[in-house]
Amino acid sequence: MDSSRRDFLRAAVGVTSGTALGGLAGLGASLAPTLARAQELRIKDAKTTPSICPYCSVGCATLVHTVDGKIVNIEGDLRSPHNEGTLCPKGPTKVLHRAPGATDWEEWDLERAMDRVAELVKKTRDETFIERATSGKLVNMTPAIFSLGGATLDIEWNHIQQKLMRGLGIVAIENQARI
């Protein structure tokens, strides 16, 4: 293993800092004020934008902190009656996949999972696409795919989703807000 002097120094500082903090915590010293101050400094110059978590139908309120247009922190909004400042561990970057007939889950990265979904949508659409009804009327549809939208998604997203689904020929389109 090749390591430079700089790598060695970084590791040494990390180990020393961890040992010192662990020792302080073991003696009963509270690190909460220091952690709160570190959090405050991290988002000091950040622009705070209220938002809503899009991962389920609850609609938890969030505060998104950005610096120069880049997200640096997302936290729950204490003012929200839904989540009272807490957030669940959603927002995946990896996907658990279980192949048909398999008993174990396999971890996929998000890119691979999205490619697989696109592949299956295209395959299903190609296999089930109906251009004309038996009467000869042009219908351009696929009856084999169903789309379910989320209740907390904004109107713009729902509009784009409707356009995409209708463009694919999907006619079974529903929104979670109505179910």
Image (cartoon, rainbow, N blue to C red):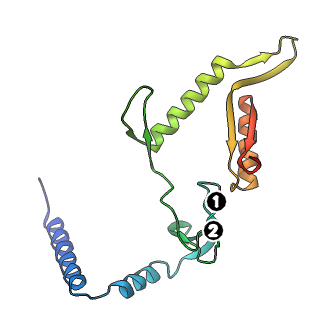
Question: Percent position (x, y) of residue 135?
Answer: 88, 11
Write the residue at 71% across / 30% down. 168
Characterize the local packing of mark 1: few (<14), some (14-19) or many (20 or more) Cα atoms within 10 angstroms: some
Question: Percent position (x, y) of residue 155?
Answer: 76, 54
Quadrant hosting residue 96: top left
Q: Is residue 97 above or below residue 130?
A: below
Query: In this orientation, which residue lies closer to the viewer: 99 or 91?
Result: 99
Q: Which residue is mark 2?
A: 82
Q: Is residue 116 above or below residue 37?
A: above
Question: Percent position (x, y) of residue 19?
Answer: 18, 77
Query: In this orientation, which residue lies closer to the viewer: 82 or 50?
Result: 82
Write the residue at 19% across / 82% down. 23
Q: Residue 153, labelled with which disc?
A: none
Q: Which residue type carries mark 1?
A: Val
Question: Percent position (x, y) of residue 80?
Answer: 64, 73
Characterize the local packing of mark 2: few (<14), some (14-19) or many (20 or more) Cα atoms within 10 angstroms: few
Write the residue at 44% across / 79% down. 39
Tag 1 secondary structure: loop
Q: Which residue type carries mark 2?
A: His
Q: Which residue is mark 1?
A: 58
Q: Is residue 25 left or right of residue 68?
A: left
Tag 2 secondary structure: loop
